[in-house]
Image: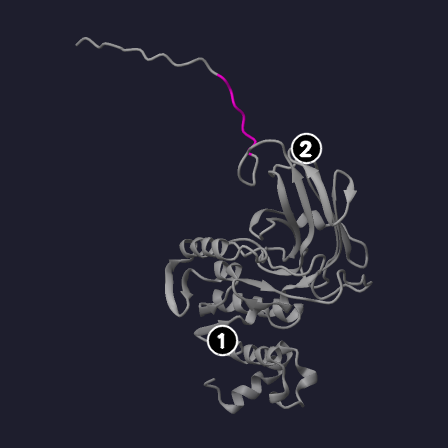
Amino acid sequence: MGLSREQLNDRLDSIIAFSGLDSALDMPVKTYSSGMQVRLAFSVATSVEPDILIVDEALSVGDGVFAKRSFDRVMQLRERGTALLLCSHAMFHVDLFCERTMWLHKGAIRDFGNTTYVLPHYQEFLDSHHHDAGPTLSAGSAVPTFGKEGEVLQASETQSQAPTLAASVDGAEPATTTVKPAVPRLLKAQVSMDGMEGKELLGTSLQSTLEIAVQLQVSKEEPHPRVAVVISSASGKIIGSSICDTHAIASQDPAGHASIDFSLPQMPLNKGRYRIGIYLMAHDGRYVYEWMDPYAHIELAHDGVHQGPWLLPGQWHCSPPHTNTATAHIA
């Protein structure tokens, strides 16, 4: 690390506090889980404010508090001028942190250049090779992942698995608490189509209304979060998303409980089966605290022969035919 023992001792308390491993200090490091080892290594490596920081999928380790803390630490180092080499399958992180991207495939360089140029190529590759995967992470989007239907997943508990991320926690809905948590939490969600609630819903394109009600608990330490709704195809490709503004979650009770509703009238999607995902994001959209994806599925019917997932809201008008006329110019 390039630190003297004295320098290391000066940083020891802050390293321990950042890692959150206070209770495990008396245990041999060889008994640590892989996640604990990564947490400790990340805490030590970032304590020295390095000129170059290499991060290999370490942003998704630990509980929600540590994951958010690590994310903020990397952002701070980057803003101070630290060069970041990020190895990740999470395109959201790559798009957020990196100006240039190298896409490696089976040990060879597949593409290299500006991040805005490389990521769309990588997304096209995922779309064409992984039709059965969950929603993949598009550049600039939230952090879509997938789990069992109705599960509440924490971004901190994910394990990188190309080409998508996956996670699992026990229980479909976390218990409501009267104490504000350190990070925002999803408490409950309800999805309905034309007033009928459920996890498997039927509707009609251009007629039905999709409604989603979300209950959450805000944090005493974090700014008001944002809620996102993600609609994906049955194969997992993201069709579209909608993200609320932070002021939409301004009203809450003393315990920090809040509710927010989303409505999509005259469903603009073509006939077919779609999955509904719900995400709880940081106020600036840089971090996803929790998500439920898929939380529900909808099946839309439509009599037309239109192609593609979207039914374009354009209008056709009939106009008289144009007559070609010749104009002579005499000098």
Quarter occupied by residue 159: bottom right
CA–CA distance between discs 1 and 2? 56 Å
- Residues at circles 1 and 2 in contact by the CB criterion of under 8 Å: no
Q: Is residue 320 left or right of residue 59?
A: left
Q: Is residue 30 left or right of residue 121?
A: right
Look at the image and tell me in which quarter the C terminus lies: top left
Q: Amino acid at mark 1?
A: Glu
Q: Position of residue 15 (x, y in %)?
A: 59, 80
Q: Is residue 105 left or right of residue 310?
A: left
Q: Earlier in the sequence, mark 1 or mark 2?
A: 1
**Residue named by callout 2:** 207
Q: Range of the magenta residues?
A: 312-318
- Magenta residue check for 18: no
Q: In the image, is residue 211 above or below residue 56?
A: above
Label 2: how many Cα within 10 Å (few below 14, some 14–19, many 20+): some
Q: Is residue 245 visible?
A: no
Query: Which residue is pictured at 48% across the width and 66% down the height?
Result: 78
Q: Is residue 178 left or right of residue 303?
A: right
Label 1 vs label 2, nearer the camera: 2
Residue 49: image tag = 1
Q: Is residue 58 visible?
A: yes
